[in-house]
Image (tube, helix red, strand yellow):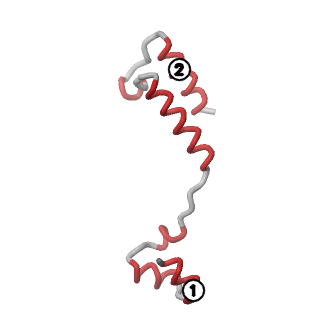
């Protein structure tokens, strides 16, 4: 709504945000790295499907086996 007020009625961003109860930070926010976010989400889904518990949750390394391979591959991609 604030965007419409600014675009159509020439209201200042500050006034529009105060009127609609938002912040100027939220008004100006634009998501970034959409492609990277999708890649990370896909990797996390892969880890979930492999039923792997990441080491930061267990305090150690994943057990050996197919799950640890899936975790290692996903973790390597995340750290690039």
* Rendered residue at 63%/46% (across/down): 35
User: In the displayed structure, does residue 80 sit left or right of residue 1?
Assistant: right
The numbered dot on residue 70 is 2
* Quadrant where the C terminus is found in the figure: top right
Viewer-nearest residue: 14 or 19: 19
Residue farthest to the left, as pictured:
58
* Rendered residue at 53%/16% (across/down): 69
Q: Position of residue 22 (x, y in %)?
A: 41, 73
Q: Position of residue 13 (x, y in %)?
A: 52, 81
- What is the distance, in whole Å, between disc 1 and disc 2 at their CAs? 52 Å
Q: Earlier in the sequence, mark 1 or mark 2?
A: 1
Q: Is residue 60 above or below residue 9?
A: above
User: In the displayed structure, does residue 57 sit left or right of residue 72?
Assistant: left
Quadrant of residue 61 within the rendered picture: top left
Q: Position of residue 20 (x, y in %)?
A: 40, 79
Q: Which residue is mark 1?
A: 8
As helix, strand or loop, the secondary structure at mark 1 comes to helix
Residue farthest to the top, as pictured:
64
Q: Is residue 43 above or below residue 67?
A: below
Q: Is residue 9 above or below residue 43?
A: below
- Alpha-carbon neighbours of circle 1 within 10 Å: few (<14), some, or many (≥20)? few
The numbered dot on residue 62 is none
* Rendered residue at 50%/13% (across/down): 66
As helix, strand or loop, the secondary structure at mark 2 comes to helix
* Rendered residue at 56%/57% (across/down): 31
Give the mark toward the camera: 1 or 2: 1
């Amino acid at each position: 709504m604030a965007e419409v007020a600014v675009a159509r009625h020439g209201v200042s961003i500050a006034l529009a945000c105060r009127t609609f109860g938002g912040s100027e930070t939220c008004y100006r926010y634009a998501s970034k790295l959409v492609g990277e976010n999708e890649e990370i989400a896909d990797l996390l889904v892969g880890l979930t499907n492999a039923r792997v518990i990441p080491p930061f949750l267990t305090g150690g390394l994943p057990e050996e086996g197919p799950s640890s391979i899936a975790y290692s591959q996903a973790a390597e991609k995340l750290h690039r």
